Each structure stands twice: as C-alpha cells, then as structure tokens.
Image (cartoon, rainbow, N blue to C red):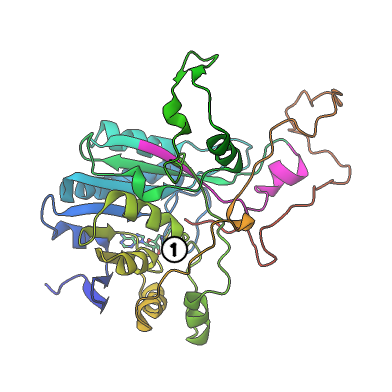
C-alpha cells in the first residue's frame, strides 16, 4: 500500500507533512515527543470549510487523536490545545464541548491538567452579534481556552522562560520599598516581594491580538494565488509554550498544522518540528514561511506602551443609578428599537477581530 502521507517540505529543523496526522502518529515511536502544540479544528454548530466537526460529536472525533497523543508523548512531555468555545444554535448559551474534551482527556486517557490558560484577543470585535450587539444580553466572547495537559504530573517546564515586565505600580513599589506585613487575606507578605528579580511571573491569561494582516505569509499567499488559512493562531502563542516547555533540540509536533506557524516558531527556536496538514493548499502557503530562511524576531522596546493591554475595572462607568429593569424573558423577545452599538476600539485599523480555529 502506498504511504498515506509524505514530506511536503523540509528545513534544517523540521518538515511540513501532507497527510492525516493519525497515519503519521501511528508510525511515531512511543514516548518520543516533547510537545504537541496545536489548535485543532474547533467544534462548530455550523460547518466551516476546513473539516470542523459538529460540537456534539467532538469528543468522539477526538478519541483516536487522544490515544496517539498520549502514546507518543514522553513522560516529561506536554500537550497544549488552543480551542475556542461555541454557541448553541439559535440560543444565547454556550456549548460545553471544549470542557467535555478536557474532562475526557483527563478521565478517559490519563492526561493531567497541568494548568488551564486563557488566550485573550483584545482586538476581537463583539460577537455573536445577535446576543451581544443587538439584544445586549451577553458580553463579547474574546477568549480561547488553552488546555495545557501532561502525561505525568511533572512535565518539564519553567516560567523563567516567559517572564514579563513589571507593571508600573510594581516598579514603584520596588523603588520605594515594601514594608513586610500580613495581608487581610492572611497571607504573610515577606520582604522577598520587594526584591527586584528583573521581571514578573506572568498570569495564565495571555493577551495577544490576532491582527495579522500584512505579514510575509499573507503576502506570499496573495502573490501565489493561494488561500490564506482562515484560522491561524498568532506566532506568540506557540512561541510561549515552546519556550516554556521545551529545550533546544527537543521534538515538537503540530498534528493540525494549518499554515505551519508552529514550524516557523520552532525553526527559529531550534526545536525539531513536524507540522502535519491534510490540505495541500494550506501547505503550499506554509512553504512560503520557510523560503526566505530563518527570520529573527524583531526586538520590541519594552517601554512601548502599546505592548500593554489594559482592562478597566468593572463598574468604573456606573453612575450609581439602577437603570431600567431587566427584561423578565431574558431577552427572548427581540426589541424593535434602534440598536445602540457602542463604538469599539480596535487595536489597529486593519483589525477584523480574527480568531483561530
Ligand atoms: C485550526 S486549523 C490550525 C491552524 C494553525 N494553528 C495555524 O495557525 O495556521 C486546523 C487545521 O487542521 C487540519 N486538519 C484537520 N484534520 C486533520 C488531520 N486529521 N490531520 C492533519 N490535519 C488536519 C485542517 O485542515 C486545518 O488546517
């Protein structure tokens, strides 16, 4: 029987593979992979054009992948899954498929939840429009869950690789000194907190706007008349986990390779990588990422204010009045009055509030 998959393009550190990742993984040795970093097709209630399954059938569809992922990971390895939620069709309620997936992976396949992350896309436009901007009964959906799972409770990891700059108030505290005392919560804040370690430990909320609109990849696809992958994650997302969870020379697989961004990040970070993708059209575009050789990441000045995203405190606009009573039917009846959509503040004029998946 002919090999059901093939190397489509290879580089110094890795390869784009054309085929079904289940076939590729079946040929991978047990305990041979350090990190599976991926964004699978999300479960949807309406079908998209790159093979998404219905959210109701998602766990069943994922089972053979789960089995292979667990088998090929090393005991020190991690599985990181970026997955967005879905709304139940015609209802202002959320589908539970991505939580069910997490529970299935832990309870049926023996994965451990090392930590859950939330990827906040600050430039996401308000959606779904019917619930958010028309009936005004939900807020905009702007986070993806990122499940960091591991084969044992002790995957290799270091948060020192993903430190972030101190906030202005922390910098002030460090320069003015901190008086050690017991907090109202009962925590003892020792004077160790006033030690300047150079950078802060990040929270499990990752802010990355998904606003790529004029990258080399996009221009390459346009110039070669190729489809731009519609559900890419930004390079900063795989980079964060590849740096935190692997060392130089380790092996990283993206079984839902898409536009090959995990490969581009790994090539730059000198990890061995394999991005497996079913669609040859997407791989044609992915090749463009590697044709001009490894590109250094541009150095971003830390003090540049645009590198920070801020969320105002809830209630800051409340003037103390109670407003009109809430609709007793929960917004089931669509009001006929003119919609008063609040102006949004996209991060850039090209922003379309893109999301992956
Ligand atoms: C959400 S996209 C991944 C996008 C990618 N993270 C990026 O940023 O470019 C999921 C991809 O998985 C691919 N796919 C779905 N099932 C697959 C399978 N069994 N083997 C390989 N690729 C698959 C789809 O064609 C799609 O391109």
Q: Residue at x 49, y 49 (%)?
A: 44
Which residue, given by chain and number where applicable, does mark 1 sit on?
Answer: 50
Instruction: Give the vertical position of 77 relative to 327 (above or below).
Output: below
Q: Is residue 274 visible?
A: yes
**Left or right for 112, reference 205:** left
Is disc 1's CB within 8 Å of ligand 1?
A: yes
Q: Residue at x 27, y 66 (%)?
A: 270
**In terms of secondary structure, where does tag 1 sit?**
loop
10 Å crowding of disc 1: few (<14), some (14-19), many (20+): some
Residue 283 sits inside the magenta stretch:
no
> Residue lying farthest bottom?
223
Instruction: Give the vertical position of 227 relative to 26 (above or below).
Output: below
Residue 81 in percent (x, y) is at 37, 48
**Left or right for 181, reference 103:** right
Residue 336 in percent (x, y) is at 86, 42
Q: Dividing the image into four quarters, tell me where ligand 1 lies.
A: bottom left
289 or 133: nearer the eye?
Answer: 289
147 or 196: nearer the eye?
Answer: 196
For residue 167, which quarter of the picture? top right
The span picked out in magenta is 115-136
Residue 193 in percent (x, y) is at 45, 30
Residue 71 in percent (x, y) is at 16, 47
Badge count = 1
């Amino acid at each position: 029987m002919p090999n059901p998959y093939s190397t489509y393009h290879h580089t110094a550190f890795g390869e784009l593979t054309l085929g079904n990742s289940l076939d590729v993984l079946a040929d991978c040795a047990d305990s041979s992979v350090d990190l599976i970093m991926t964004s699978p097709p999300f479960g949807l209630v309406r079908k998209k054009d790159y093979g998404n399954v219905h959210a109701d059938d998602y766990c069943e569809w994922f089972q053979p992948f789960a089995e292979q992922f667990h088998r090929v990971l090393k005991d020190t390895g991690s599985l990181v899954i970026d997955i967005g939620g879905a709304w139940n069709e015609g209802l202002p309620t959320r589908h539970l498929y991505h939580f069910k997936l997490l529970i299935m992976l832990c309870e049926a396949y023996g994965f451990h939840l090392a930590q859950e992350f939330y990827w906040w896309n600050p430039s996401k436009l308000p959606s779904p429009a019917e619930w958010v901007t028309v009936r005004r009964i939900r807020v905009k959906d702007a986070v993806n869950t990122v499940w960091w799972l591991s084969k044992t409770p002790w995957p290799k990891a270091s948060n020192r690789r993903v430190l972030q700059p101190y906030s202005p108030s922390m910098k002030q505290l460090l320069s003015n000194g901190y008086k050690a005392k017991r907090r109202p919560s009962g925590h003892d804040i020792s004077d160790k907190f006033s030690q300047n370690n150079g950078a802060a430990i990040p929270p499990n909320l990752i802010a990355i706007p998904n606003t790529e609109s004029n990258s080399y990849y996009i221009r390459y696809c346009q110039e070669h008349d190729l489809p731009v992958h519609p559900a890419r994650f930004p390079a900063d997302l795989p980079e964060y986990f590849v740096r935190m969870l692997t060392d130089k020379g380790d092996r990283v697989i993206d079984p839902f390779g898409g536009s090959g961004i995990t490969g581009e990040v790994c090539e730059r970070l000198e990890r061995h990588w394999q991005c497996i993708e079913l669609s040859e059209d997407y791989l044609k575009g992915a090749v463009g990422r590697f044709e001009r050789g490894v590109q250094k990441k541009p150095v971003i000045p830390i003090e540049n204010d645009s590198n920070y995203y801020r969320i105002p405190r809830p209630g800051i606009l409340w003037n103390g009045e109670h407003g009109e009573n809430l609709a007793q039917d929960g917004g089931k009846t669509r009001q006929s009055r003119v919609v008063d959509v609040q102006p949004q503040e996209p991060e850039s004029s090209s922003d379309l509030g893109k999301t992956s998946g």
